[in-house]
Image: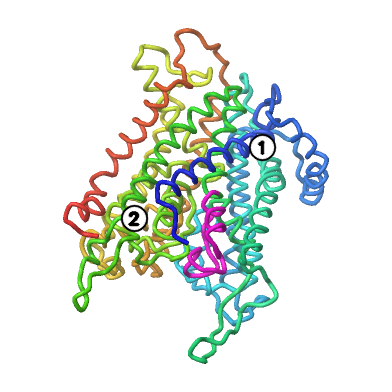
């Protein structure tokens, strides 16, 4: 059966995404209804959610008793930062030990060795920071490591991000009250009520479609067409894949990631997994409006980022459904058929349109999962991927994505108020120099972490030797690598030999700084704002739920991203495109 036209696939995906974002956004608003707003419970369109308390509350209380958590103990922003760093340090140590000593740990069915110290540093840092960038083949980890190391981190790190959202909401709903809630309570609620149940549903769908799920064996022995024998690595694919995509993680069990049938077997599984990436992030943006008592504002922010997301996805689809100039050759008098688009390094069961939507969704969120190899994309397609990075990911990651997005929203509110001669404020809280300096720090972290190492790598022989392509494409390989690490994304352009000590150390520090410097600055902003009075909205206040604000927000994001990263993009995909490259 022929694939539907690209415009149909494109339209169906975004219609489904919009519907699910609304439903999941209402659910997420309900999950943190008490933690995000201590004054009142934001009403939900779905009152039957309250019935789920009878299921979830006993499980949460069990976690509290087991771990000794006192959910009633409130924290200031400094206590919050301390808790985040201590909790994540525990995850890092756990991962590092498991990775280095996996050769002597159980469930090592095929005898894989422990990772080297520098590779383990990068892997532990990457998965602790919810970046999930891999400098190793997925088959080089044991079933134990995937299940009890990587798998646990894939739940705990997005739960860290989720726990930050209600704390930041309290900055605007509190009235001169520095208390932002309890970090550990928010982690437990995010796990029990959001990540675990939705990931379970996704995993069941994947298993129904044919994805593998086992921890009792590490390989499947099959007979090939040439009468040979091949050992294929298997493990808890469905479970890992579910949280890998929904938790904006990305580290796959297989080296080819979601291009393999064990992880992503059918077009339906591909659609479900593609939808899983933006749902968790955009639903948080929608829930923000409910938490602060202004749903229309949450919808306005969703619309702004959805417009950018749809536009860049459209560019990717155009780039990958067109012909590949590099394949415009004849063999024995016959030209290469490119009527279906650029199929190099893409799965035939997905095709170029579904691969393009997935790829742009990957770089629009902090998700490193791939279902095609991006180094084989056209120059136009590669530009769309890298520009999504330049915006610090369009919708970013679970939890932390909302906070990163709000930095642009606050900046837009600040600029918009000054443009109309009003006192800058956002959601009733005055915006002063104390908050704005941290907003600028957060926005500048990405270009600093990307461009400075990029400048060094393109003149350092060790990094140059890792490039498998010359010229513009080689420059793009390194730029994508540093974007992937510094934007907490984790996906790979491929083609770059990044499994070296140089990239392990540089990327390892990038993922840590890109995660925890913004979190610290954002919680400091929350601390300053929480101590302020709430100023009532007036006719002179800047409306943050109008088409004008949406347009201004889109303009600020595009202008800031272009001003900072356009020169680097010119040396990469733009230069390649203008020179007639693929």
- In the rendered structure, find residue 27 and report the number of the disc placed on it: 1
| Magenta region | 249-275
In percent of the image, x 64 and y 67: which residue is there?
236
Compared to residue 144, the image places residue 59 above or below, namely above
User: Which quarter of the rendered picture does the C terminus lie within?
Assistant: bottom left
Furthest toward the front, the residue is 1
Q: Is 416 on the left or on the right of 186, as rendered? A: left
Measured in 3D between alpha carbons, the distance from the residue under mark 1 to the one under mark 2, in whole angstroms, is 36 Å
270 part of magenta stretch: yes
244 part of magenta stretch: no
In percent of the image, x 49 and y 18: which residue is there?
430
- In the rendered structure, find residue 481 and report the number of the disc placed on it: none
Q: Quadrant of residue 268?
A: bottom right
In front of the other: 66 or 36: 36
| SS at badge 1 | helix
Circle 2 packing at 10 Å, graded few (<14), some (14-19), many (20+), is many
In front of the other: 131 or 376: 376
Q: x and y percent of residue 371 in the render?
A: 46, 61
Q: x and y percent of residue 345 in the render?
A: 38, 67
Which numbered disc, 1 or 2, marks the residue that appears first in the sequence? 1
Q: Nearer the viewer, mark 1 or mark 2?
A: 2
Q: Which residue is mark 2?
A: 321
Total marks shown come to 2
The answer to whether residue 438 is seen in the rendering is no
Q: x and y percent of residue 190 in the render?
A: 67, 44
The answer to whether residue 403 is seen in the rendering is yes
| SS at badge 2 | helix
Q: Is 481 on the left or on the right of 160, as rendered? A: left
């Amino acid at each position: 059966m022929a694939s539907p036209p690209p415009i149909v696939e494109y339209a169906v995906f975004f219609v489904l995404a919009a519907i699910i974002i609304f439903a999941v956004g209402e659910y997420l608003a309900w999950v943190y209804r008490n933690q995000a707003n201590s004054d009142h419970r934001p009403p939900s369109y779905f009152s039957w959610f309250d019935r789920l308390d009878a299921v979830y509350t006993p499980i949460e209380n069990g976690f509290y008793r087991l771990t000794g958590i006192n959910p009633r103990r409130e924290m200031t922003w400094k206590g919050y930062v301390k808790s985040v760093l201590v909790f994540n340090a525990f995850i890092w140590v756990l991962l590092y030990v498991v990775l280095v000593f996996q050769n002597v740990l159980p469930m090592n069915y095929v005898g894989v060795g422990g990772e080297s110290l520098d590779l383990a540093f990068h892997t532990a840092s990457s998965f602790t920071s919810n970046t999930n960038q891999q400098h190793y083949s997925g088959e080089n980890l044991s079933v134990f490591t995937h299940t009890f190391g990587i798998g646990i981190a894939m739940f705990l790190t997005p739960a860290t991000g989720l726990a930050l959202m209600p704390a930041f909401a309290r900055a605007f709903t509190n009235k001169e009250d520095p208390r932002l809630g309890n970090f550990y309570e928010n982690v437990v609620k995010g796990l029990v009520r959001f990540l675990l149940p939705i990931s379970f549903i996704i995993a069941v769908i994947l298993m129904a479609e044919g994805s593998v799920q086992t921890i009792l064996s590490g390989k499947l022995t099959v007979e090939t067409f040439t009468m040979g024998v091949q050992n294929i690595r298997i493990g808890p694919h469905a479970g890992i894949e579910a949280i890998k995509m929904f938790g904006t993680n990305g580290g796959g069990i297989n080296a080819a990631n979601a291009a393999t049938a064990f992880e992503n077997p059918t077009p339906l599984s591909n659609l479900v997994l593609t939808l899983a990436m933006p749902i968790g992030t955009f639903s948080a943006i929608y829930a923000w409006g409910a938490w602060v008592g202004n749903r229309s504002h949450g919808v306005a922010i969703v619309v702004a980022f959805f417009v950018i997301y749809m536009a860049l996805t459209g560019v990717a689809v155009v780039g990958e459904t067109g012909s590949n100039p590099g394949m415009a050759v004849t063999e024995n008098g016959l030209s290469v058929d490119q009527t279906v688009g650029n199929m190099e390094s893409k799965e035939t069961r997905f095709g170029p349109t579904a691969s393009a939507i997935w790829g742009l969704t990957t770089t629009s969120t902090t998700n490193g999962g791939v279902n095609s190899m991006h180094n084989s994309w056209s120059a136009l397609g590669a530009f769309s991927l890298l520009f999504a990075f330049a915006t610090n990911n369009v919708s970013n990651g679970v939890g932390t994505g909302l906070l990163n997005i709000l930095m642009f929203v606050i900046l837009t509110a600040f600029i918009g108020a000054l443009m109309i001669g009003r006192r800058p404020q956002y959601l009733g809280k005055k915006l002063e120099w104390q908050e704005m300096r941290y907003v600028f720090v957060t926005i500048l972290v990405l270009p600093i972490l990307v461009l400075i190492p990029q400048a060094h790598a393109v003149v350092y022989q060790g990094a140059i030797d890792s490039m498998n392509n010359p010229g513009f494409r080689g420059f793009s390989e390194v730029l994508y690598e540093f974007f992937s690490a510094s934007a907490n994304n984790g996906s790979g352009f491929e083609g770059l030999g990044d499994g070296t000590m140089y990239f392990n150390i540089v990327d390892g520090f990038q993922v840590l700084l890109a995660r925890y410097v913004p979190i610290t600055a954002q919680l400091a902003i929350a601390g300053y704002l929480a101590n302020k009075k709430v100023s009532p909205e007036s006719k002179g206040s800047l409306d943050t739920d109008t088409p004008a604000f949406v347009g201004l927000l889109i303009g600020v994001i595009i202008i800031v991203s272009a001003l900072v990263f356009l020169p680097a993009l010119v040396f990469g995909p733009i230069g390649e495109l203008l020179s007639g490259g693929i």
